[in-house]
Image (cartoon, grey):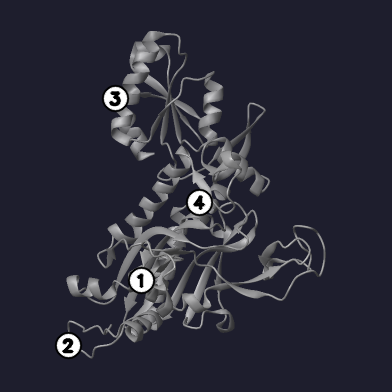
Amino acid sequence: MAEVTLDEIVSLAKRRGFIFPGSDIYGGLSGTWDYGPLGIMLKRNLINLWWKFFIDQRDDIYPMDAAILMNSKVWQASGHVETFTDPLVECQICHARFRADKIDLGKCPSCGQKDTFREPQNFNLMFKTNIGPTSEDASSLVYLRPETAQGIFTNFKNVVDTFYPSIPFGIGQSGKAFRNEISPRDFIFRSREFEQLEIEYFINPKDWQKNFDMWLQLIREWCQLLGLSSDMIVEHEIDQADRAHYSKRTVDFEFKFPIGQEELLGLAYRTDFDLKNIERVSKKSMIYHPKDGSEPFVPHVIEPSFGVERAIMAILSSAYQTDKVNDENRIFLKLPNYLAPYLVVVSPLVKNKVELLDKAQVVFRLLKAEFGAVMWDDNGNIGKRYRRADEIGVPYCITIDFDTLDNDTVTIRDRDTTEQRRVAISELISQIAII
């Protein structure tokens, strides 16, 4: 099977209602994307899976949802105001601007001229806005958060004071983040508005290696849950010279995307950098007092950080499959059942027979009440319906035909194998549940 291209992923995403270019009807807005009906269902399934795996099934992670707008001191303390920058260059011919590290051989991607760039300048990636009516007042300046992590750190003391958890423990949240990317590119891989799934896991520094190894294994299991082959994932140990100055160890999990091998998610040991900064700026203690009465300390942090958009791009790239059925080319998304936007599609064999439509509606309502993610399709012939369902990743197609009227059985078709078999309506729920 040939490797999928980015163009094929983008085409499928738009054609089938997964992801559309933002503001497309008005000419678009670079770096923004809208999730269509299937895209938001896939995205919701992914986020729900993250909550289940990393939070709901554990007893050491506390969920929260911090505000997107926060006091500017948050970003001053964290270093974002001074250091959250990319190198920007401007072409002196066409005045287009780009990230300096993405310019190939000094050639302007806009006008094609060479060696026309000014010296690189640091460009802060945070979006600025103002709170209140006095927009000229410096005290009204706030930022759209460029990450969700700082919302967790600023609430560390609140969680400790209200729940007094035993260390190690984590705080997790999912939510929007915003970065004024100089050159958003490669579909949803790098955009200006995106969603993060982040956990800050607070530990005793003497136990950092044990906890880091635990999170490495959890992330490997997570990648398997997403249906990502281990052959497509590379664990990249970041050298000290390339790590953030506060990181004692960082491992990037890279995926072989259609655009090349790029970062999918990261695991970093951030030491006590963030809590110490909060202490310094807020003048409030971040010291944790162990329940066993041992010596108090400022916790260190291990951070597993996941980007939703990159995960979705990896899932679509991995799930995109092609084969031939009856000498006809077929595209299908081999998604795990729990990620597929729809688990089942229900179809009457033909739509001009009232008795078939009525029976199909009974089956549809039965499955809809049980699974929720069930789709109705009576448009076109049954072969075309199968192809549509395959292309959006529906695991099972159920067809109500004339035999159904005689014996209360239906045809259930498997997306991956295209095999079909008869199943009694009374057994449908259990059959789908165990497959």
Q: Amino acid at mark 2?
A: Gly
Residue at image mark 2: 293
Q: Is residue 196 above or below residue 165?
A: above
Residue 427 visible here: no
Query: Which quadrant: the C terminus?
Result: top left
- State the mark number for residue 71: 1
The kind of secondary structure element at disc 4 is helix
Q: Nearer the viewer, mark 3 or mark 1?
A: 1
* Residue at mark 4 to residue at mark 1: CA–CA distance: 32 Å
- Left or right placement of residue 117 versus residue 350 in this view: right
The kind of secondary structure element at disc 1 is loop
* Residue at mark 4 to residue at mark 2: CA–CA distance: 45 Å
The residue drawn where x is 79% and y is 63% is 93
Residue at image mark 4: 312
Horizontal and vertical percent position of residue 419: 50, 30
The residue drawn where x is 56% and y is 29% is 387
Residue at image mark 3: 426
